[in-house]
Image (cartoon, coloured by chain):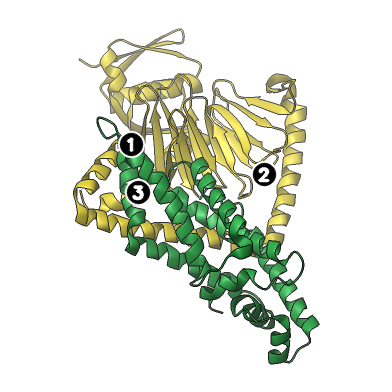
Amino acid sequence: MNKKDIIALVEGRLTNERKQEVVKWLLKNPKQQQRYHILKAKHVAKSLKQSEYGSSDSRKSIYAKWYKYVGYAACAVLIFSLTYTLTLPVDQTETPDASQITSATSIGENKTIMLSDGTKVTLNANTTLSYPKEFSGELREVSLKGEAFFDVTHNPKKPFMVATGNGMKIQVLGTVFNVKSYPEDLNVETTLVSGKVKVVEERDQKTVVLNPSQRATYVKDADKLIVDNVQTENFTAWRQGKLIYDETPIRQVISDLKRKYKVDISVESPGIMDYKYTGEFDNLGIEQILDLFEVSSPILYQIKNNQITLYMKK
Amino acid sequence: MKPEHLHNLKINALSDNGTEDDFSIVYEFYRPKLVVIVNSYIPSQEDAEEIVHDVFIRLWEKWETLQITTNFTGYIYSMTRNACLDYLRTRKNKLTKDMSAEQQEFWLNHSALADDMASSILAKELQALVDEAIDELPEKCKKVFKKSRLEGLCHQEISKEMEISPKTVENHITRALRQLRVALNEYLPTLFF
């Protein structure tokens, strides 16, 4: 352990497990602990100042902001009227309770919607997003089942919150990030592109604050929150129809393929599930992808009326 | 202006509700900043807000009779710091068989905040922010405001010293308070980061 760990602790970048280790270590090393006291105070002082700059900025650009909102509002009206005429019968239903709107995509479908505050959300396949027609109250709250890419309009007075129903929620002020939270997946992942988000684990309210290019993975079974640095492009490329994998367990790849192509995939040997795959599929058909599997990994496939079976090369 | 003298803030109520005006400016200015500080040592946002809230209630109860001889920022900061240390102390000293991870964290945070050297960094930063806010007032206005609120001069004295009418003095102070209010209102929603 060294200064790097202390700084990571101060900045709240550690996983719970690692945090416990570092805290324990500090309590046993008075000299290092002293160091922590000062670094922590400096960090808090810095965040005090930062909250300051943010607000004086907003004071100066009040008109610029106003115009931006008008612009966003206009866009929102346009998009809403378009969606209304084009898609209302299929996938936009208003729940009776009030002004909650539910927007959904089916397998293989992507869709971008604009919320009333100008926030843009792109839904990946097989995803449902519920949001109010207008954001009233102190929070902008939406709930997500599936995967979506958020570009949230900055509004420090009304924090934006994404509930996943999968044991994790995400709080933001205005920022760009991706949330992947399918009920059938093992993990819930939040990847931050720009800005800052706070990820809250709901069971015991543990929180981590993400910096750009960081990902928070919540392991549902183990109730664990892991933070790592990633190439954000890999996690947002789905918006361009690309699937990019870097040491990703095949389990995850299969889940993604099932949602993107209407196919059933089964595996012959369970060992395959944990095989880590690296590769990129740029707008390919399912058979092309499976062919690529065969060249780039020890995985082979068979296909019989939409039923795909994967097995390991002997 | 030397905000070390902010202690006079409440003495020169310029109008009937001057005291309340001063209090709400103090509240709007310090509250969000204190929440940021407290929340950094006490992870629960709710508890952090409550601690700061209690500090202001105690401050309000004493407001009319408050006599601070050193400096106001230091005063409100140490009130808050003590409240935090109390909170952390009860939690770190809870008797359990094995010290839980949470308890260890309380222990660490308690010593971090109890460390005078580390703590003075926070007090200084808070002070710097006070300086900045008052420094943004227009020149004349700032001068009158400082004389009134920081040096504790009454309107008559300021009027004589600066060779302006008492009415103008009053106008400057009203303006200063209004501007501080508008500027400080912006700080209110610093809830999350």
- Single out the residue that lies furthest toward the top: A305
**Are marks 2 and 3 in one subunit?**
no
- Hue of chain A? yellow
- List the single residue furthest toward the front: B65
Q: Are marks 1 and 3 in contact (CB under 8 Å)?
A: no
Observer able to see residue B33: yes
Q: Position of residue A265 (x, y in %)?
A: 41, 13
Query: Can you say whether B135 is above or below A205 in the image?
Result: below
Mark pair 1, 2: CA separation: 48 Å
Front residue of B54 and B130: B54
Identify which residue, A134 or A31, lies in the foreground: A31
Query: What amino acid is found at the position of numbered circle 1 in the picture?
Result: Lys
Q: For the residue carrying disc 2, how many other residues have a C-alpha within 10 Å: few (<14), some (14-19), or many (20+)?
A: many
Q: Is residue B34 left or right of residue A30?
A: right
On residue B109, the disc is 3
The x and y percentages for residue A45 are 43, 61
How far apart marks 2 and 3 lie (CA) works out to 40 Å
Q: Is residue B124 above or below residue B62?
A: below
Q: Which mark is residue B94?
A: 1
Q: Secondary structure at mark 1?
A: loop
Chain ID at mark 2: A
The tag earlier along the polypeptide, 1 or 3, is: 1
A275 horizontally vs A114: left or right: left
Residue at 51% across, 66% down: B73
Q: Which numbered mark, 1 or 3, is in the foreground of this view?
A: 1
Residue drawn at (43%, 43%), measured in percent from left and top? B43
Chain B rendering hue: green
What's the CA distance linking mark 1 and mark 3?
15 Å
The residue identified by callout 2 is: A118
